[in-house]
Image: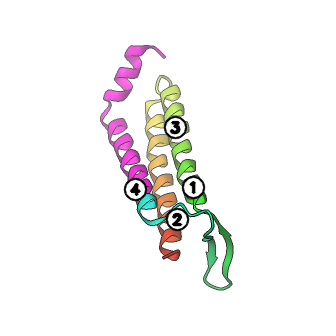
Amino acid sequence: MARYELKIFLKNKWIKISLIFNLIILITTLIFIFINIKPDPERSYIIYYTSLEGIKMVGYFWNFYLLWFIGFFFSILHFSLAIYLWIRNKKLSQFILASNILLNIFLSLAIFALVTINF
């Protein structure tokens, strides 16, 4: 991909909107984790909880950052794939970035639920 094609890619309105939404979701989730989860290696946090059976798995504070990093990794992966597919099919690359918004929303909701359980 040439440099001018990358500029055209980044000037597209839908690409900008999806990238801004992804950044807002990721930054908001990271700030939420920083504020609410204290880095205490001696404390165990609830990682997996069911309403019928209760606590199923506990872990340390870095597991929340690992969940956030998964969302960040998939954002980079989807952005790279959207750039690669931009030349061939513009609608498909926009769809990939829009699906990444949904992925980050669901992952953020899961992180918010886990953090609120640990209060």
- Counting residues from the start of the chain, the first of labels 1 and 2 encountered is 1
Q: Choose mark 1 or mark 2, whichever is in front.
A: 1
Q: Is residue 78 left or right of residue 9?
A: right
Which amino acid type is shown beneath numbered disc 4?
A: Ile
CA gap between label 1 and label 2 equals 9 Å
Q: Choose mark 3 or mark 1, whichever is in front.
A: 1
Number of numbered markers: 4
Image height check: is 94 above or below 47? Answer: above
> How many neighbours does mark 1 have within 10 angstroms: few (below 14), some (14-19), or many (20 or more)?
some
CA gap between label 3 and label 4 equals 19 Å
CA gap between label 3 and label 1 equals 15 Å
Q: Could you say which disc has been placed on residue 67 in the image?
A: 1
CA gap between label 2 and label 4 equals 15 Å
Q: Is residue 93 left or right of residue 24?
A: right
CA gap between label 4 and label 1 equals 14 Å
Q: Is there a contact, CB below 8 Å, between mark 1 and mark 2?
A: yes
Residue range highlighted in magenta? 1-30
The secondary structure making up most of the magenta span is: helix
> Which residue does the image show at 62% across and 76% down from the upper left?
49
Residue 107 in percent (x, y) is at 52, 58
Which amino acid type is shown beneath numbered disc 3?
A: Ile
Residue 41 in percent (x, y) is at 61, 62
